[in-house]
Image (cartoon, grey):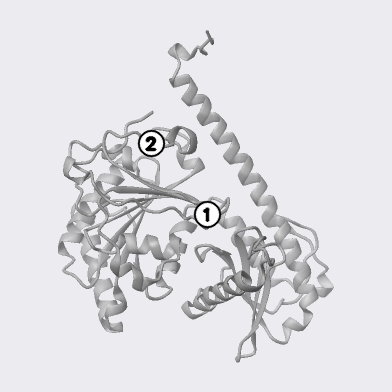
């Protein structure tokens, strides 16, 4: 097993993150020299050549008190933003598994801001190898010159180890800034960060910038865009959603070939204005159609998911509390006062399709439901292919691990 990242001796004590008890996801923290608990059974180690194929890694970095742990708690633990005021500063590297579905499936590594992971006692190459995305959080309400210097050091070192990393910059805590100040802060940080890269001859490194706050839905939208870049099936999902909203009548739809047949005489617009494929646990949308995303539209979808889950928890369970609040029968219709209908349907155990339909078009609800049935079947086909790939990668990874653990690759003979 490979050696985990080392930690200075003074950082040994600290609180551990609590796992997602409601949904079965795990979180853990560890320090130098300690074997990672359960790594051999549940996780792939750093040096595993197939680790990025099975479970991509997202690194959450930034200076101390920039809001990294608060982001993680609000997005993945459903913690109220006000409760994050009482969180203690993170003292250990915390690793959390997010495995809500075959598409939302990754690890988040939360790095304490006070740790210098470029210290010789750390193997930073091992940290960045196999990482899918690096999120660097900058406190927009603080002097961010030191943060920009740390960002530049982190990005340049990480890029040399793994040029395929997606670099995502969260300009955080913007809820305390005016609209003009938000734009000016983003422009200044964007300019300085890219100028530093240009001075180092690294203009080809692309940085993505997001204005975020835990007090609105901006943090969920930003995380959605980060996660989407880690989903290999994203083009397939987007094409399926484009077909779903643009065609009135769907006949046999084969997701892998992205081919669709329809009756030319009945071809017309479906009346669906926008469609999202949501992970209902985190409210991250893993795909949407090609039309632009409006922030207000996204917020309405998030609020609808909250309403559906909350009401289902109250009225959807049996008297003895058995059952689940969200299942294959879950559906919801909300009519807005602007002649638009919000329509939610269950796709899988953790995914939901939320779409905006014009009220006059919703009179053809039966046809929309039929189209949804075709769409749902195609998503399950994508799932099946994804699961076959994951199982194949895990099998190859286990064979590689067994080969490394035996002399000359010869299987051990039981005594």
Contact (CB < 8 A) between labels 2 and 1?
no
Query: Which residue is under mark 1?
Result: 104
The percent coordinates of residue 180 (x first, y second) are 27, 83
The mark that comes first in sequence, 2 or 1, is: 2
x 18%, y 66%: residue: 144
Nearest the eye: 366 or 246: 366
The percent coordinates of residue 101 (x first, y second) are 57, 53
Q: How many marks?
A: 2
How dense is the environment of label 2, judged by Cα within 10 Å: few (below 14), some, or many (20 and up)? many
Is there any visible trace of residue 212 in the rendered image? no
The percent coordinates of residue 292 (x first, y second) are 51, 74
| Secondary structure category for the residue under label 2 | loop
Q: Is residue 189 left or right of residue 23?
A: left
Nearest the eye: 181 or 214: 214
Is there any visible trace of residue 380 in the rendered image? yes
Q: Is residue 83 left or right of residue 13?
A: right
How dense is the environment of label 1, judged by Cα within 10 Å: few (below 14), some, or many (20 and up)? many
| Secondary structure category for the residue under label 1 | loop
Query: Which residue is under mark 2?
Result: 46
Q: Alpha carbon of mark 2 to alpha carbon of mark 1: how far?
A: 20 Å
Which image quadrant is residue 135 in? bottom left
The percent coordinates of residue 370 (x first, y second) are 78, 68
x 60%, y 69%: residue: 313
x 70%, y 60%: residue: 376
Relative to 342, does residue 351 appear above or below in the rendering? Answer: above
Which quarter of the rendering shows the N terminus?
top left
- Say which mark, if any, is on residue 229: none
């Amino acid at each position: 097993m490979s050696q985990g990242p080392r930690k200075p001796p003074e950082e040994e004590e600290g609180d551990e993150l609590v796992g997602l008890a409601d949904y079965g996801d795990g979180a853990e923290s560890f320090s130098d020299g300690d074997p990672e608990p359960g790594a051999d059974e549940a996780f792939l180690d750093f040096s595993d050549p197939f680790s990025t194929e099975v479970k991509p890694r997202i690194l959450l970095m930034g200076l101390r008190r920039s809001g990294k742990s608060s982001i993680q708690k609000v997005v993945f633990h459903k913690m109220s933003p006000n409760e994050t005021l009482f969180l203690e500063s993170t003292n250990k590297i915390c690793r959390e598994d997010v495995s809500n579905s075959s598409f939302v499936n990754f690890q988040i590594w939360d790095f304490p801001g006070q740790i210098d992971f470029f210290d010789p006692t750390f193997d930073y190459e091992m940290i960045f190898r196999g990482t899918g995305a690096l999120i660097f959080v900058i406190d927009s309400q603080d002097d961010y010159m030191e943060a920009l210097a740390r960002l530049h050091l982190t990005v340049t070192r990480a890029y040399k180890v793994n040029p395929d990393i997606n670099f995502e910059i969260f300009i955080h805590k913007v809820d305390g800034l005016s609209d003009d100040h938000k734009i000016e802060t983003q422009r200044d940080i964007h300019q300085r960060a890219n100028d530093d890269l240009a001075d180092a001859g690294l203009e080809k490194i692309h940085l993505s910038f997001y204005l975020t706050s835990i007090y609105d839905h901006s943090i969920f939208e930003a995380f959605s865009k980060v996660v989407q870049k880690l989903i290999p099936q994203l083009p397939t999902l987007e094409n399926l959603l484009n077909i779903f909203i643009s065609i009135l009548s769907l006949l046999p739809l084969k997701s892998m070939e992205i081919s669709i047949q329809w009756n030319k005489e009945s071809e017309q617009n479906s009346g669906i204005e926008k469609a999202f494929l949501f992970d209902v646990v985190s409210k991250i949308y893993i795909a949407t159609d090609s039309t632009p995303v409006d922030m207000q539209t996204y917020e309405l979808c998030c609020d609808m998911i909250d309403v559906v889950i909350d009401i289902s928890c109250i009225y959807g369970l049996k008297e003895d509390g058995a059952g689940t609040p969200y299942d294959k029968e879950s559906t919801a219709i909300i009519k807005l006062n602007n002649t638009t209908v919000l329509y939610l349907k269950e796709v899988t155990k953790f995914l939901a399709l939320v779409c905006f339909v014009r009220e006059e078009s919703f009179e053809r609800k039966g046809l929309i439901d039929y189209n949804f049935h075709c769409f749902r079947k195609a998503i399950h086909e994508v799932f099946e292919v994804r699961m076959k790939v994951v199982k194949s990668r895990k099998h190859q990874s286990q064979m590689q691990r067994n080969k490394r653990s035996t002399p000359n690759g010869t299987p051990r003979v039981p005594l």
